[in-house]
Every structure is written in C-alpha cells, then in structure tokens.
Amino acid sequence: MTQTIAPRVRTLVLLLLAAACALLAGAGPASAHAALTGSDPREGAVVDKAPAQVSLTFSESVSMDDDSLRVLDPKGKRVDDGKPSGTGGTTYSVKLHAGLPDGTYTVTYQVVSADSHPVSGAYTFSVGAPSETSVTVSGQGAGGGFVGGLYGVGRYVSYAGFAVLVGGAAFVLACWPRGSGVRVVQRFVVSGWLSLTAATLLLLLLRGSYTGSGKVADVFDLGLLGEVLQTKAGAALVSRLLLLAAAALFIAVLFGAYDKREDEERRDLTFGLAVGGSVVAVGLAATWAMSEHASVGLQAGLAMPVDVVHLIAVATWLGGLTALLVALYRGPADTPVPALAVSRFSRVAFGSVIALVVTGTYQSWRQLGSWTAFTDTRYGQLLLVKIGLVAVLVGVAYFSRRWTAQLAEATPAVARSAAARRAEKGEKGAGKASTKASGNASAKAGAKAGTKASGNAKVAEKGSGTAKGSGTAKGAGGSQRAAQLARQRAAVDAARQKRQRDADPNRFGLRRSVLAEAGIAVVLLVVTTVLTQTEPGRTEEEAKAAGTSSAGSSAPATGAVTLDMPFDTGSQNGKGVVRVELDPARVGVNDLHLYVERPDGTAFDIPEVKVALTQKAKDIGPLPVAPDHITTGHWSASGVQIPMAGDWEVAVTVRTSDIDQVTISKNTQIG
C-alpha cells in the first residue's frame, strides 16, 4: 500500500512546487503601496519661468532621505539643494537652484511607504520649451534586482516558518499531546522556528539595500544597518528576533519537560504552555501587522488586531494541517495518529476558517473599497484566487471529516480485534510454559536416579574447566546474537504494524484527503504572501482617479490622430500626399509616423521631410521634430513631447529636389 502512495506523493509535491514557482515568477518586485497622486510642476508641463521648488504628493505617508528626491537638468546635473521637506507626511518638496535655464528637467524619487515598501518613479517638466535631455532613468523599480529577489524569498520563507511553528505547536497542544514525543513532529516544529529565524536575519541584513541602492555590497554596510534599526520595519524585525528567543524556550519545554510528564501532570502544564505560546504567537503576528498594510490607511487601530487574528488563524489551520500530514505519512508505526486527535483538529480548523472569513471580509473591504476593484486591480484578482482556494480547501476538508468519522467508528473494532489476538497469544504462551515446566521436572527426577557414586576426579576437574571456558565464550556470542535477533524482531514488528496501519481503508482515505488539503494550502500560502507585496486595490484606484483627474484638467487622452495633407512642389513627380499619425495624441510622450505616397497610393521616397508643432494661442513653438527614415515612404520619431493640451498646428516641410520644396499644415486638437 505504501508503495502505491509514494509516487502519488512525489507527483503532487512536484505539481505544488510548479504552481508555487509560477506564482513566484509572476510576483516580480514588490509593488508600490504609496502612489504619486500629484506634483507641482505636473508631469509634462511647460512653465514660463523656473519654479522655486518641486513638490510631490503621495497617497499615504512616506519617508525620505537627502537623496530620495532629485531634480536633474538636461545634462543630468543635479539642480536641487538635496534637503526634502515634508508637510503632513504625504507631501514633500525640494528647493531648486536660482536662475535655471530653459529646457527639460527630470524629477526622480525613491521613498519608503508607511507599510515598509519602496516606491520609485520619474517624470519630466520643461522651462520655456522642451529640449533634448541626456538623463536616462533606469527601468528597474525600487525593490528589484538580485537583492529584491532575495528579499522576496525571505518574505516567503518567513511566512511559511511562522505557519509551521505556530500551527505545529498548536496541533500538539490542542489535538495530540502525545505527539510531543514523536520525533518527526518535533523536527517539523523546530524546522519552522529555524526557517523563521534565518529569514528574519536575512531580511534585516537586506533591508537597507532593498529600500535604497539595491547593491549587494550595501548588505554588509553597518552604518546602513544602523539606519534600518531606527525605522518601523527594522524595529519590527528586531522584535521578531527577541520573540523567537522566547519561542525557543517554549519549544524546549514542549518537547522536553512536557513530553516526560504523565497524563495528569501534563494537563497542568498544558494550560501554562497554551498561555505562553499564545502570547508569543500574537507577538510574532503583530510584527507583521504593525509594519505592513494594516498599519496604514483606514481604521489602522482596528485593522492591526484584525490582521493579527487573521495571521494566527491562517497559521493554525495551514500549519496544523501540514503537521497532521507529516504525522500521518512519516510518523512511527507504533504511534499512529489517533482518530480523536484528527477530530480535535477538525474542530480547530473549523474555528480557524470562521475567523478567516470574518477577518478576511473586513480586510477585503478595507483594501479594495469597491466591487470593481476585484476585477480591475491586481490585488483584487489575487484576492479572488485566494477566495477560490479557500473554498476548495473547505470542500476537501469536508471529505476529511467524513474519513475521520469512519476512522473513529472503526477504532473500537480494531481495538477488540487486537485484544483478541493478544489473548490468543497469551493462551499459546501459557501452554508452552506448562509443557516446559513438565519437561524440567522429568529431567530433574532422572538426574537424581542416574547419579553415579564414583568417577574420575581429575578428568571431571579438567572437563569442568574446559566447559567453563567454553561457556564464557558462548555466553558473549549469545548475548550479541540475542541483541541482533531482538532488533530484527523489532523491525519485523514495526513493518507488520505499518502494513496493518496502511491497510486500513479509512486511514488511507484520510491520508489522501489531508495530502490534497496540504497541497492546496501551500498554494494558498504563496498567494497570501504575494498579496502582502501587492498594492492594495483602494490605493491603486485612488492613484488612477488622481491621474485621470490631472489628465482631465490638463491633457485628456483623445486617442491617435491621423492627418492627410496633399502637397505639390511644382516639379516633376512633385505631387503626393503626406499622412501624419500621432499616437496617443496627448500631453507627454508621443510617437509620430509619417508616410509619403503618390496620388495613386504607392509609397515613394523624397530627399527630405521635416515636422514642426506650434500652438499659437499659447505662443508655444514651433517645436521641431526630425523623423528618421524607416523604409520606402515611411519616417518615424519616438519620444515626441507635447507639453500642453490644445489646438496644435502640425506643419510638414516636403523637399522633392534640391530646389523644390513646400510646407503644408493642418490644425488638430491634442489632449
């Protein structure tokens, strides 16, 4: 029976790892949890004179240092004083140098949001008129790269370790006290403690580089580590390490003094361990609640304790489920998991699910804010996946409860059968003992009757000495042989007990259903961890609304614009049509495509073509555009800056020979 189970276990584990890797690959760097909702000057704006300062407004409070907000001129030289000042924690400004010349300036920012996630971005504005700029902003966002990947791994391992530690200990205390003496259960819980401790140390070392430069060398910068310890996230990680020291003492008592106590004494110690373990578990969960999503936004005072309950419920359910799976598959044959322990865990899991539903509903309302956010935001989509996984997990748990009930009903019959076998063995043993006693009595009587009165004393003495030496040698060899036979008998008995245990159809069905539950739980834990790194739907929608409002007041998108302009330079083959396509025809960066065709629609090349954009109402322009030749009759230019919405004149100069050229124009509404 076990030979048929093992391939299935390996296959399911590989599938779970593949699913987890797919989710991890799609997670990417941690998303920004504080969004830029406003700026002055705004993105893409063209101002008449240089501003005295640049201001940024975020959707939630952020923290900055001297290099968090920078303003660069067209040559990439820094033109700010490097000392951002904040108002209310959401708006920060930096003063600019006096007398800045005309041109395009780049604003870059890299801050840390109140929920401990790094946020970065950049935009441009122009003084007088747009110009070329040598500034290139890296496409890698904050929290990315190798350090960001390691930090993400540390987060996943820390959540998994917390679930294993809390859930495994709760399973032993509340469901199976005798499991404290089972070696595989002990190793399982200790592995959770080790994983959480190692991940916390890793996160603490990586934190400074993760929210800053992203360089591996900065991981070992003690000065940067000192700065991290003064932040909210750093204090939470240090607190977690201190609580893990208390957790180590709890584990030592659970698998030491608690395991060695008798049942009556164990009950007295259970209460103390339950209270102490609960305090440690709540403290560990609070280190996440006080430094991430729950600590900012709406009703933070209520959200943090709700988040603590949510985390503990997840750990109790998923960690306890995995502990049960380990005990069912890897536990010793002479100490099987009793039906009573499975029934107790079923009740604990049901209570955890109720807590998850209540706290999860509140968290969903708080983080989403609207029904449309379920489908329109990444956070909402992941939350739908999580809800679906919980529903499937509850369905599988229903079948586990059925197997548990059948196992409980079968237990008395199995016990009676075992008692009958022991009684039968006892009768056979008594018969053998009676026969042996009778034989010994007959032998003793014969010895007395056959005793000889004389004998050779010397021969008897030599024989006695020889027999004594031989008996000593045989005694030592017999002792080793007896120990070897005892080990063989123990191994045979253990194998027989395991075969009998695995042959029980009810227990086999329970193991399969628990394995399925654990598999779904692994994916659920991965999705939950990804959710903690994803921008909440409410914040994402607020940022979209702010961006739409800003664009609506200055540059509403109208889609691509296509202009057809006939031309005639007066020379041979000097007639044709110029088609200009501007996409997306709004304030900011645009792509321009220009096509030249003969009157019959065939494409042809000309020596030169130029484009200029002018807004006469605001006295802006002409802004020259020099498109590159792509193929026959096709020119293109990318990065065309439209600084302001309004009625723009698009002028095209066409030269068909050394002396023949013409300029044609059309007006269009952009933005």
Image (spheres, helix red, strand yellow):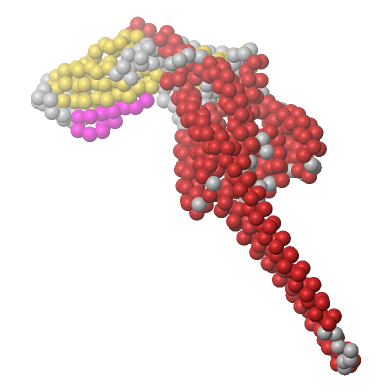
Quarter of the image that includes the C terminus: top left
Query: Magenta region's main secondary structure?
Result: strand
Residue located at (24% from left, 25% from top): 594
| Position above or below: 129 against 521 | above
Residue 453 image point, x, y percent? 89, 89
Q: Is residue 378 left or right of residue 470?
A: left
Asked if the stretch drawn in magenta spans residue 90, the answer is no
Between 141 and 25, the one lying in front of the other is: 25
Along the line of sight, the residue nearer the viewer: 129 or 500: 500
Residue 287 picture location, percent across and down: 68, 28
Residue 446 falls in image quadrant: bottom right
Is 42 placed left or right of 53 in the picture?
A: left
> In this orientation, which residue lies closer to the viewer: 653 or 67?
67
Report the span colored magenta: 624-640
Q: Residue furthest top?
A: 617
Left/right of residue 463 with respect to residue 405 in the rendered view: right
Residue at image coords 26%, 11%: 667
Q: Residue at x 42, y 21 (%)?
A: 375
Q: Classify 78 as above or below 642.
A: below
- Residue 236 visible in the shown view: no
One can see residue 176 in this view: yes
Q: Residue at x 79, y 82 (%)?
A: 470
526 and 120: which one is in front?
526
* Picture layout, residue 32 above or below residue 501: above
